[in-house]
Image (cartoon, rainbow, N blue to C red):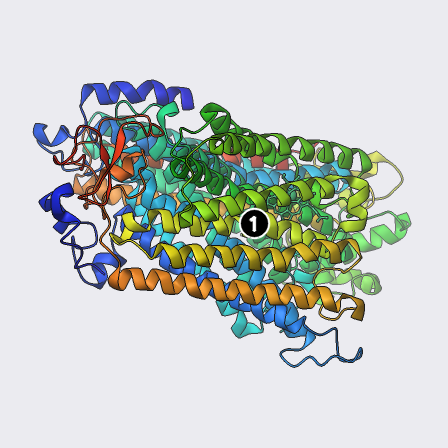
Amino acid sequence: MSSLNPAAAGPLVGAPAADNYLTHSRGFWSWAATLDHKRIGVMYLAGIFTMFLVGGLFAVLLRSVLLTPDAAAGGVKTIVDANMYNRFFTLHGAVMVFIVIIPGIPAALGNFVLPLMLGAKDVAFPRLNLCSFYLWLIGTAMALASLYWGGVDTGWTFYTPYSTKVGSSGAFGGVVPVVAGAFVLGFSSIFTGLNFIVTIHKLRPPGMTWFRMPLFLWGTYATAVIQVLATPVLGITLLLLLAERLLGIGFFDSELGGDPVLFQHFFWFYSHPAVYIMILPAMGVMSELISVFSHKHIFGYKFIAFSSVAIAILGFLVWGHHMFTSGQSELLGVIFSAITFSIAIPSAVKMFNWLTTLYKGSIDFKAPMCYALSFMWIFGIGGLTGLFLGMMGLDQHLHDTYFVVAHFHYVMAGTIFVFFGAIHYWWPKMTGRMYDEGAAVLASLLMFIGFNMTFFIQFLMGTRGMPRRYYAYRPEFQFHHIVSTMGSYVMLAAVLLLIYVLIKSLRSGRPAPANPWGAGSMEWQCASPPPHDNFKTPPPVVDAYDYESLEWDERVGGYVHRGRRGGPAATH
Amino acid sequence: MTQMADAVHPTSHAAVPHGDAHAHGHHPNLEHHFDSLTQQFDAGKLGMWLFLATEVLLFGGLFCAYAIFRRNHPEVFMYAHQFLDTTWGAINTVVLLVSSFTMAWAVTASQRGQRHLTSILLALTFLGGVGFMVIKAVEYSHKFHDGLMWGVHYDPAKHEHGHGHNGAHGAAATAAHGAADHAAPADHGTAGAAATAAPAASTHPEATTSVHAPETSGQPAATGAEAADLPPERAPLEPSQVALAPAGPAGLHTGGHDLHGPRPDNVHWFFGVYFTMTGLHGLHVLAGMAVIGWLFVRSVRGDFSADYFTPVDLGGLYWHLVDLIWIFLFPLLYLIH
Ligand code: HEM
Ligand SMILES: [Cu+2]
């Protein structure tokens, strides 16, 4: 992977490409103890992708179980029994939320790209950054260790009293390691957010003003603010949950006069903002992809930037929409409902700005763009169905049905599309290799088809009354379930194809030029892969969305700045 | 914060152009990705402030829980706080305030490059932490001993009868209980039924131990809370206690503090809140002590100088936050009216 591309070193980047961040030092410890944000990003990416496969495996198993209604209704359940099913969906949810999506874009790609985009040498606190990564590893290990204690069957929301009373094996159960693991993962997330905020505030080189920052940085900045402000509340909630289960503290235990709904408030106070931790960085990536692959300046830069901030703020005020059926007062419900609606506005602002950017652009259907366009469709549906759920009356009917399952997959799993798009987009930068475009586009199409097959029909099931988290169901839903499961197999095929594409690229991909896409932001101005120090002297700050000054240079197979053609292109 | 950061930012760059620091001789404490010590210091400081914000929010959850429980059930708090020892609480407040002072002084000393003074002050601050934890441990052990614990472990059977639990009992019965509670340790768990075994009190081996005597002897204004806090077997047998009766406030008066009437339900909440808040705070004190210990080692080693004192400064901020949280906890838990 690292004895790379003599060709890329050719006319474009001159000699230094031989010494890039991958070849800079060797051996296990040069990675395990690295302080280089790029290596940390790559390690995160490898870890998170692996965990995505683990979570995905659980998902495919779940879907397979649901092929038949249940034994009594004439179906035969062969794979697992009902209890095991509960553990599967819990672990699927917990892994995907806490281990994959939350750190996904910020910690893996953000770590790699953020300092480069900013023109900085590293994040503000490299040691803390490495510490975040190890916390992620430890938290992940703890979550998986729960399997050893019999797994967890509470759902990823850990609602009390399930999580405090019921347990697969005694007082300890699998709940304790998972909850403790989520606590540790929370701190990993806090430290990443803290690092990014300080980096953006303090490490911007001269000339990089707030409004010259690429929108991905605005997205990660808004995300980081939520990570820092919301995650501690999750931390204390999980600590109280542990205290409840292990020490019997009684806060959430109605037998002791406590209040289980208090747990729900605490939990959603974090977990609703957390959905924006998942989606804001994805929206940031979207702004880059849409603009770059339309070869057109992003439309409404400031609107997009501020809508990220608006979402971050409003996101703190809507948690009660998860509790319309939990006995919260009607007045509170109305207020939460109203704020929930208003959050659709900044979300829509982004959608319309992307649309307008596409308008009359010269659209290039490269794989990252295919993922980005898929996301627009998917997020459109996900966001609009959120409005259905935000209506107090309608939610009485839809709450805890497959409609909710479909909604949050359209939004949360939608971010996975952006994650994949981002991986393809920055892949040449990270590895110094191009990937097979045709196969990658095919994978993205398959993914899109599979996704909609799997989840769209769940809206129908939900409105007709199929409750979520059920192992057995009435036979009239079998058709829906079969379609949904088939869709998940299509997605599985797409993921396998994607893995094939990436591995093939590592093995035999064409060496990547510094700027294969014609993008304007700074990370494309240093070599692919970047040198250890990123920039010896930072390149001049230009408008990241100005594509006029870039032109295709056949000799390097990439874009170069007009006028710098043939010369030593803008590298570090 | 943001404003400030912005204001600082351009100047620090203007002063030292990017990548230029190396040319001026590399300060050993300047990390490679910063341009100047100022930039590095600013970054560290902003980072620390953000971290403190997360700590505030971590405790914020608990303060929320406190507010909810207290609003819904003020009587639990009115009743139960009396079992906390205000004297120890106040002493601990002073201990932490003094340690905050020595910490602030240590920061100033390190800015001035006074190495020895810095080390001494750090050591004093550390000792303040030790003192706080020791006192906390004493308080905790009393609570454990009295069964004044949280949730399922709340079991003050031997305790409550002598101190204010007089709702359903007649005066005589209460008086008997008052005596009986001194016997309770002997027949733990059956206090009610064993009320008639009252005379055992005076023969209890731990009836008055000298260990506990100083606590109240030096405090003429000992409050009812303190008296109530004493486990029965070490409370001096006072007439006022034996006379506890529902009849009137006069009878409830102990040591200048009214013990409130019937024990409300769910008193354990208060102790749940008390132990989680002070427990989490205690963990933070320990963490702060670890930081200060590490600063002390570095200070003795001579790592700090007038142009590099960032760690002392940041460690100081953390310690002040830990103090500040206690400043909130003390009145919220000990001084309820
Ligand atoms: C247009 C913006 C959105 C609106 C109006 C909205 C509204 C809602 C409402 C009202 C619910 C509660 C449904 C119920 O439990 O009965 C809900 C659930 C959920 N939403 Fe959203 N949502 C929006 C965006 C998002 C985004 C961006 C994500 C994630 C990236 C997300 C993830 C979730 C999840 C995970 C749940 C289900 C939680 C659970 O019970 O397990 N939502 N949404
Ligand atoms: Cu929500």
Q: Which residue is more in the foreground, B152 or A83?
A: A83
Q: Secondary structure at mark 1?
A: helix
Within the image, what quadrant is residue A218 found in?
Answer: top left
Q: Residue at x 43, y 29 (%)?
A: A298
Check mark 1 vs ligand 1: CB closer than 8 Å? yes or no.
yes
Tag 1: amino acid: Met
Q: Which residue is more in the foreground, A318 or B163?
A: A318
Within the image, what quadrant is residue B223 found in?
Answer: top right
Horizontal and vertical percent position of residue B84: 63, 43
Quadrant where the N terminus of chain B lies?
top left
Quadrant where the C terminus of chain B lies?
top right
Q: Which residue is disc 1 drawn over?
A: A412
Q: Which residue is more in the foreground, B69 or A510?
A: A510
Q: Residue at x 38, y 24 (%)?
A: A210
At label 1, counting other C-alpha atoms closer than 10 Å, the crowd grade (few under 14, some 14-19, many 20 or more) is many
Task: Count how many numbered circles sit on residues in the image.
Answer: 1
Q: Residue at x 57, y 52 (%)?
A: A238
Does residue B8 appear left or right of residue B36 in this picture? right
Does residue A144 appear left or right of residue B130 in this picture? right
User: Taking the image as drawn, is residue B269 in sight?
Assistant: yes
Chain of residue at mark 1: A
Q: Residue at x 76, y 39 (%)?
A: A391
